[in-house]
Amino acid sequence: MALKEPPFSIGVEEEYLLVDRDSYALARAPDRLMNDCKAELEGQVSPEFLQCQIEIGTCVCANVTDAREDLKRLRSSVAKHAKTYGLAPIAASCHPFADWKEQHHVDKDRYNDLKRDLAGVVRRMLICGMHVHVGIPDPDTRIDLVNQLSYFLPHLLALSGSSPFWQGDDTGLASYRLTVFDNLPRTGLPPHLSGWSEFERSVQALVDIGVIEDSSKIWWDLRPSSRFPTIESRICDVQPRLEHTVSLAALTQCLARMLWRLKAKNQRWRLYDNFLVAENRWRAQRYGVGGGLIDFGIGEIVDFPQLLEDMFHLIEQDAEALGCVVEVEAARGILETGISSDRQRAVYHDSIQAEKPKEYALQDVVRHLIEEYHTDL
């Protein structure tokens, strides 16, 4: 009996930082701003952990075309209301020069509990990410695809790096965000699980002890969603440009379908130990698309452009079936322009070459991020 194909519906969540339009420093989201956004966007916008953050989430979308339109509407609304208060959103995973010690968390029970439970570690969470949900109704299939899709998480991370700066310094990393996030418990690559029942037992063991309330406190790079019948990729830095968000979402959706297609033919992607996949995760975090990733099948480091073409070949028929060939192939454009970390560094270096003080060069980076946020709206 043939397996019933999942809908592979898609949903995207993004976290933004709010900055002052004059100083380019982080700014607290006024209550009136949040109320204005909620009035227009209803249940699709919410505060995040820190007062300078705002989070949006699309509706459940049948395809990436619908996701793009919803994201465009959400981003435009946040920008419009922020401008009223002299603010602007940026979609970068770290602010170039902000100091986490000067930020304050939102006074909500959930966030107060996080501050209590995670102490000094959570105070440093001045980071933003993007999450991509792909609809997979069958629980065991969700676990099976999480096990296999983990291999490709470094590839997605490499394309997404948008956090080169931290507290005014160039970290040398494409994604400094992960060095901060990985200090939390229950993060990193997901373990290989035998099925949904093992996942439930493991979660319930922590719930019964009182360590967590539910699986929403499991923050793996890829997980079965705690709220929806989806797998949720959490590996990517948030993207300054809307079209890059859409491209990464399309790649995630197509990879999930490709792996399901293998499953339908009683095949699967080879599972590699997390020790090995974590090495590629580090390379993506450190170098972005500039250092290549290890192809464990041939035992060599392969340049990222070749890896991307290989991925296109793997998911070619899936992109056609899901109607997102253009969005998938747009990932080539990310390589051509450089990932966000590369673009931010270029702005900074140009400003330094123009003999601007470091403080002004970093402000130029924020100005660049504001411009990129509005590019595709």
Image (cartoon, rainbow, N blue to C red):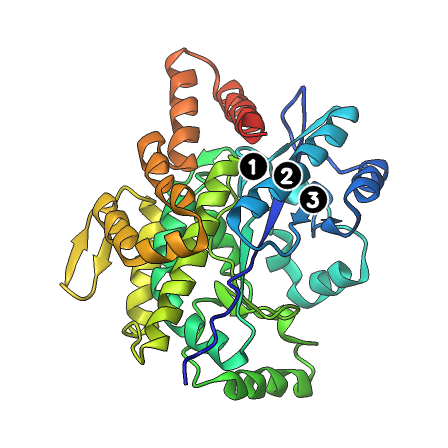
- Residue type at mark 1 is His
| Foreground label between 2 and 1 | 2
The image's mark for residue 228 is none
| Label of residue 95 in the image | 1
- Quadrant (top left, top right, bottom left, bottom right) of the C terminus: top right
Left or right: residue 293 compared with residue 244: left
Location of residue 132 with respect to 239 vertically, above or below: below
Q: Amino acid at mark 3?
A: Ile
Residue beneath disc 2: 17
Mark 2 Cα shell of 10 Å, populated few (<14), some (14-19), many (≥20): many
The label number, if any, that marks residue 54 in the structure image: 3
Near mark 3 (Cα within 10 A), the count class, few <14, some 14-19 or many ≥20, is: many
Name the quadrant containing residue 19.
top right
Q: In the figure, 211 relative to 355: above or below? A: below
**Quadrant hosting residue 272:** bottom left
Say left or right for 296 vs 241. Answer: left
Mark-to-mark CA distance, 2 and 3: 7 Å
Q: What residue is drawn where x is 74% and y is 49%? A: 46
Q: Nearer the viewer, residue 324 or 215?
A: 324
Q: Secondary structure at mark 2?
A: strand
